[in-house]
Image (tube, grey):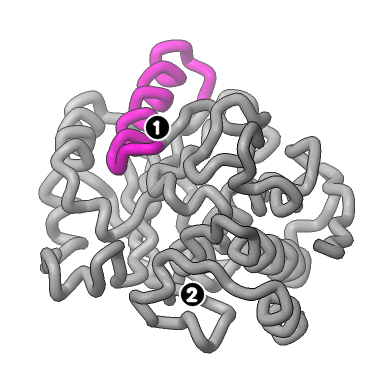
Amino acid sequence: MEQSIPVYREEQELSNLALADRATEARKLILDMAATPTGCHVGGSLSAIDLLVVAYAKYGHDKSTSVILSKGHAAAALYAALYVYGKLPSNPAESYGKQGSLYTGHPNHKLPGIPFATGSLGHGVAYAAGWALAQKLRGTGGLGIAIGGDGELQEGLVWETAQIAQARSLANFVYIVDCNGGQNDGHVDDISPIRNLKERFEAFGFAVREIDGHRHDAIFSAITPDRERPLAVLARTVKGKGVAAFEGNPDAHYAKIPANLAKRWKVNLS
């Protein structure tokens, strides 16, 4: 758990190098949480961490904007991202999953920076759209940003929310989909293939941008909202990104790893 996280400062330059450093430190924290007695949803956390790191870098200081992790099982990534930006009171890996700890396996709204608990898939998408609608009605200019998964798109609530978002012209709603191709039981394409995803969102009235979900500059540019329509950002990612044994492996959806192995993999991330 020997993390050395620099204190975040608002004036820090948002360079690719700075973002890469944050993402690397966050990945190390995720591995530490995977090395706890409970383990964690490590594959999806590693695929989503770049999205979270960039979203907080760009919008983390705007109190009228809310970043909501809808794929709540990847809570380890959320805690890691919040911690590397100095928004959490303690290192989440030190008590993750322990009885009585606030660092639970799904996002805990009792922690700073987490407005909603998102245990059930799809709910975070609706929360973010609701937040966007509230900000639109208040005229604050704030955004509702949801980060979900491609397996999560099998939830009907996602598409019900998309319908409401276009009906209310929520141009301040940004839905980032972590398209890592995997879910709890295997590959998305083997379970419930989602064809023509870009066209699907366009049919619901969304602007759509497709990006490499591990390129920080691409993420930073893509999550700027559309001026007229809700925005879907389809981020192509690799499940388990950064750890060769996990990359593209659906068995890495949830894992408990030995501490010595986590230490070795962390060195390889540096």
Dot 2 or dot 1: first in sequence order is: 1
Residue 209: x %, y % from top left: 34, 61
> Is residue 139 part of the magenta span, yes or no?
yes
Q: Tell me if residue 57 can be seen.
A: yes
Task: Tell me the quadrant of the picture where the C terminus can be found.
Answer: bottom right
Name the residue: 77% across, 48% down. Answer: 91
Residue nearest the viewer, comparing 86 with 132:
86
As helix, strand or loop, the secondary structure at mark 2 comes to: loop
Circle 2: residue type: Gly
Which circle marks residue 240 in the picture? 2
Residue topped by disc 1: 128
Residue 98: x %, y % from top left: 63, 43
Between circles 2 and 1, the one closer to the viewer is 2
Report the side of 129 relative to 31 (left or right).
Answer: left
Which circle marks residue 81 in the picture? none
Residue 188: x %, y % from top left: 21, 69
**Toward which corner of the image does residue 215 lie, by quadrant?**
bottom right
As helix, strand or loop, the secondary structure at mark 1 comes to: helix
**Toward which corner of the image does residue 125 lie, by quadrant?**
top left
Residue nearest the viewer, comparing 243 with 57:
243
Name the residue: 45% across, 40% down. Answer: 145
Report the side of 62 relative to 206 (left or right).
Answer: right
Name the residue: 39% across, 81% down. Answer: 248
181 above or below 63?
Answer: below
Report the side of 111 relative to 172 (left or right).
Answer: right
Circle 1: residue type: Ala
> Is residue 175 part of the magenta span, yes or no?
no
Q: Which residues are magenta?
A: 119-141
